[in-house]
Image: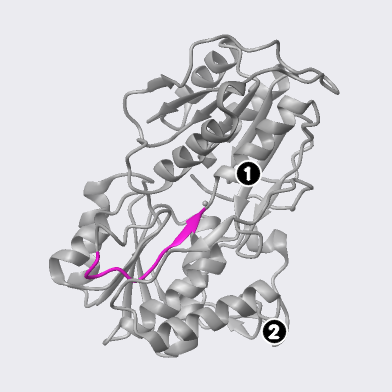
Amino acid sequence: MDRRSFLIGSLGVVALTTSGCVTNKDTATTATSAASTGAAAKLDKVKAAWVYVGPINDGGWTQAHDVGRKYVVDKLGSKVVTTYKENVPEGAETAQVIEDLVKDGNNIIFATSFGFGDAMLASAKKHADVKFLHATGAWHNPQANFGTYYGATEEGKYLAGMAAAKASKSGKIGFVAPFLIPEVIRHINAFALGARSVNPAATVKTVEIKSWFDPTKERQAADSLIAQGCDVLANGGDSPAPGEAAKAKGLPWVGYDSDQSANFPDIWLTAPIYNWGPYYLNQIQGVLDGTWKKADYYGNLKDGFNALAPYGKIVEPATQALVDAKKAEIIAGSFTIFKGPLKDNKGADKLAAGATISADDLQAINWFVDGVVN
């Protein structure tokens, strides 16, 4: 679920968020109008489908997407029929799931994991009348009916890193990483830079579990980080299992994907989260109106696609003010997270003073900043 894309398109988004058995749910059973073609006539009803890598109650990534799907249903009512398939494995099975969704008459399909990309693109090339949108996908693809969408989560990660470092007594922060791929490396780096902006001696220890959703592995990794002396935890995977490990030891926790403050009131710091609903609504409305156009999208804090979850009660007022001030700078464009001088965690110079990392290079980053221990 390498969640990346770029190029802010003219989407009109208004600022306001495994493997296993494949299941299918419909919000309605009535058939849709014929699929939109070419410049596309208006439709009376759109059939839209979502392909999820995890379960809709994972407490994180997939659940947040499904909240977005429900947002569409709430806004469009009888004008949309939505379907989702959860626990879809990345790999050969993906292609069959997507082809089945095409055969079922879906006008637009959203796939929410990076590993779904090849199958999505293959189907897009075969079915020009269907719109295919790939969350976290590889951008700049010329296929006219295939787009990507994601957000600048590194912004929220930086802010969360500040809160984590302020909460740490030892300066040792643990990060449970799903896969050490560019998206996750980018997030870890931003988190570490945020932490070291308030404590230059802070370190971020990472453990890779090679899974997006595996509560058992996530818990084991979190426990191992605690055993290594980390007194604050953060995670980049899909379940709140690291929060359970932190709760068992009374340690502060930074979540991801969803607001878990109500479930972990005594240890909650904050979390980078997403507002998927308005984006989904915009894309489906475009199909309804016959105005849909391919556009790769990379949202951020400024446009409301990304957000920082509410602070927990353990976050000191002074820390909240500090993080809020930096958030305001990011939104105003007066602060750039990845700006030199930067060294990697092996001591090599990676970015000269005053220089910034290009959008393309940031999307493909494969090195850790100073302070990350992996």
Find residue 255 and report its horizontal and vertical position in percent. 36, 61
Q: How many marks?
A: 2
- Left of 17 or right of it: where is 245? left
- Left of 229 or right of it: where is 167? right
Judging by the rendered image, the residue that carries numbered circle 2 is 352
Q: Amino acid at mark 1?
A: Tyr
Q: Main secondary structure of the magenta part?
A: loop
Query: Quick one: which residue is furthest to the left in this view?
Result: 248
Q: Is residue 211 above or below residue 331?
A: above
**Residue at left 56%, top 68%?**
155
Residue range corresponding to the magenta coloring: 265-274
Per the rendering, the mark at residue 240 is none
Q: Secondary structure at mark 2?
A: loop
Find residue 22 and report its horizontal and vertical position in percent. 37, 23
**Mark 1 vs mark 2, CA separation in Å:** 36 Å
Is 287 one of the magenta-colored residues?
Answer: no
Find residue 160 and report its horizontal and vertical position in percent. 44, 72
The answer to whether one can see residue 270 in this image is: yes
Is 270 one of the magenta-colored residues?
Answer: yes
Disc on the earlier residue, 1 or 2: 1
Judging by the rendered image, the residue that carries numbered circle 1 is 279
Instruction: Name the foreground residue: 353 vs 28.
Output: 28
Q: Amino acid at mark 2?
A: Ala
